[in-house]
Amino acid sequence: MLPWATTRGCPGHRPRHRGSQDIQPHRYPAPLDALEVALTDDVLVVHGGTPLEGRIRVRGAKNLVSKAMVAALLGDSPSRLYDLPKIRDVEVVRGLLGVHGVKVTDGDEDGALVLDPANVESASTDQINVHAGSSRIPILFCGPLLHRLGHAFIPDLGGCHIGPRPIDFHLQALREFGATVDKQPEGLHLSAPNGLHGTKFALPYPSVGATEQVLLTAVMAEGVTELRNAAVEPEIVDLICVLQKMGAIIKVHTDRVIEIQGVPKLHGYSHRPIPDRIEAASWAAAALATRGHVEVLGAEQADMMTFLNIFRSVGGEYEVTDARPPRLNDPGQEGGIRFWHPGGELKSVALETDVHPGFMTDWQQPLVVALTQARGLSIVHETVYEQRLGYTSALNSMGANIQVYRDCLGGTPCRFGRRNFKHSAVIAGPSKLHAADLVIPDLRAGFSHLIAALAAEGTSRVYGVDLINRGYEDFEAKLADLGAHVERP
């Protein structure tokens, strides 16, 4: 396996601007040479040109389940979490909880976990480092560990290695609560000699991760915490539901203000998370790009309204199927959304990514593949991540016509317009895509590359494909269920 394809990340992963003013240069992997091709076994052969047809199911949201697992640290009794996807991120957090003394066992149904925090303890640097390279989740252990143990150690954060990871918002928030942070070569040592206390705090940007940090810390901090300019994504609201089940007192006000009244103790929870709206939209984009028809069981309309509007504007069709509870002599039916290409030409659109309730940045990449098949000029203005359009070069190598610009091609206020980042794209279509060898740079771009290979004529080889397992449960089996012709060499 190549270095960029290991579980420790890849050099092409986007830098996250949400938590720092330090911007790292963005580098996508260089083309594979013959030796690398011969050595790697992390490759999927995709025979494109076949519409995806069939039904798949999405489970709990990747961006919620790992945070709910961390929240179990705060309880004084076991928690039960259901419908977890079998993805690498869940296994990473399970390992991190285990080295901190949390007993994690499988529940009584598929996808369920029981998390018992009765014996929370410190973990050694070596123990944590076994898992730290695979995920950025360790930073969210800070608040719960400070409450339970009075100290916490956070090693070098994982993800793709592109330099120091931006966590300024997290550290600033923890200091506001009364934590002290000692930066050492091996990582961060945190303590709270006088306990943690409620505070008033305003985020410079509605960061999802920093909002989660504040919630996980404030719920047991003495006094009241007021967080302004908070993220309000559905996954944030679902985490609030988890904490409220545990005994927390949290009020969500208008204008992105969250008020948390600290309580002295919390108990375990039982929770079934919201479905993964990113995965659902990814399969919808795949149906559109391949001129197919995919039913996504578990997908919910309410959390996907912005995506559904754009999907329909492009020319895609969808139908929402409501769930029917089981009754006598009726097994019931799980709800979902059917997505399909109705035939004819797709239409170009102009869209801008934004924090919720705007168009989600993780929806942008798979949809752009479908936009290569739309007639006219589509415009995409990325306002959440500063350099998330590097994946388009691979699409151009397959025959797409995409130009990226440093200018803000949209009306949404943007932090990147004068900072020399190529964060706007113009997609001219329709373009006939042809097969190519592709190297996956990061999770969401990786799935978009996979969609492009499925839509293209001919046989493509997609390298670094195991990275997709971080966020898409059993995606190869789902592709087979949808009639895709893919295989491991």
Image (cartoon, rainbow, N blue to C red):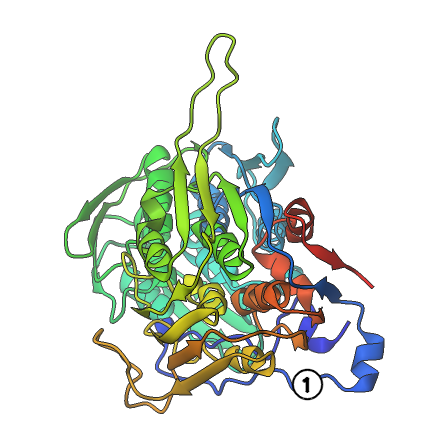
Q: Is residue 43 visible?
A: yes
Few, some or many C-alpha atoms within 10 Å of disc 1 (few <14, some 14-19, many ≥20)?
few
Dot 1 falls on a residue whose secondary structure is loop
Residue at x-position 69% and y-position 48%: 480
Q: Position of residue 66 (x, y in %)?
A: 50, 50
Seen from the viewer's position, the closer of residues 386 and 336 is 336
Residue wearing tag 1:
31
Residue at x-position 73% and y-position 58%: 486
Seen from the viewer's position, the closer of residues 227 and 256 is 256
Q: Is residue 314 above or below residue 395?
A: above
Q: Amino acid at mark 1?
A: Pro
Q: Is residue 101 visible?
A: no
Q: Is residue 334 above or below residue 439?
A: above
Pick out the residue farthest to the top: 328
Residue 57 picture quarter: top right
The tally of labels here is 1
Q: Position of residue 171 (x, y in %)?
A: 37, 69
Q: Viewed as shown, does residue 318 lie left or right of 399?
A: left
Pick out the residue farthest to the left: 254
Q: Viewed as shown, does residue 186 lie left or right of 323?
A: right
Residue at x-position 51% and y-position 42%: 295
Q: Is residue 431 above or below residue 76?
A: below
Pick out the residue farthest to the front: 344
